[in-house]
Amino acid sequence: MPFEPKEKEPKLSDKTVNIINKCMGEKIDNEADDISRCKYKIMNELLNNQDLLRTLHNEEYDIDKEINGDSYRNICIFNFLKLPDLKDKVKNYVCFEINDDGWGDTTEKTIIFRCVSHIDDAKTDWGIPRQDLLGLIIKNMFDWSNLLGMRLVKKSDAGLFTNDGYYYREIIYRQNDPLNTYKKIHSRG
């Protein structure tokens, strides 16, 4: 007996569903939302990096075997800047956000990665704190990457901490897309 597909929440119009589907494909379309498309690509890269998944040290999974990255989505890896909660079981996170600042014919994206580790799980056997090791893996993946089109250039890399026992490594990239040609040529107007 085949399962009946679950109706998704919230219920959206066919037009919005089509735009979402275009964001999650490789073909660029002027109706695709650029932020959603970029978040989808970054999330896939993160979920497919076994070093990153093991370094997140989620004890619910056997770290000696290959980890199904999708099981980490919205558990340890978030496509928004999550603030840790003391009630959370998970002690380590990677979060990211994309901001778009367009003016004239130029678009500038800012991609923020936040690698978070609780003091109870910050120590690694490599002599590098977990949040810094997560940051090292992120930088290796994204420094000068052209995953989103134009090259990502690191703007800053800073260590932060909170009063409730979390250490952060926040890495910010910028991407300039002068003339954003595709959108300019295909704009409705």
Image: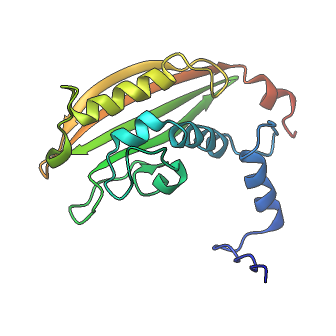
Where is residue 177 drawn, in percent x and y? 65, 21
Q: In this orientation, does residue 26 appear?
A: yes
| Residue at 70% in and 45% down | 33
Quadrant housing the C terminus: top right
The quadrant in which residue 112 appears is: top left
Quarter-wise, where is residue 167 in the image? top left
Q: Would you say 31 lies left or right of 79 here? A: right
Instruction: Say which residue appears at 78% left-offset and 23% top-offset.
Output: 181
Q: Is residue 125 above or below residue 140?
A: below
* Snapshot colouring: rainbow
Q: Nearer the viewer, residue 115 or 32?
A: 115
Task: Check the image and report above or below for 167 versus 83.
Answer: above
Q: Is residue 170 visible?
A: no
Kindly give the residue lying farthest to the front in the view shown. 64
Location of the N terminus by quadrant is: bottom right
Does 59 sit above or below residue 13?
A: above
For the point 80% across and 46% down, the residue is: 31
Q: Position of residue 95 (x, y in %)?
A: 41, 44
In percent of width and height, residue 46 lies at 51, 39
Question: Residue 98's spot in the image, x, y percent?
Answer: 52, 39
What is the quadrant of residue 170 in the picture? top left
Query: Residue at horizontal 49%, vertical 54%?
Result: 73
| Outermost residue to the bottom | 1
Q: Nearer the viewer, residue 63 or 144?
A: 63
Instruction: Give the number of marks.
Output: 0
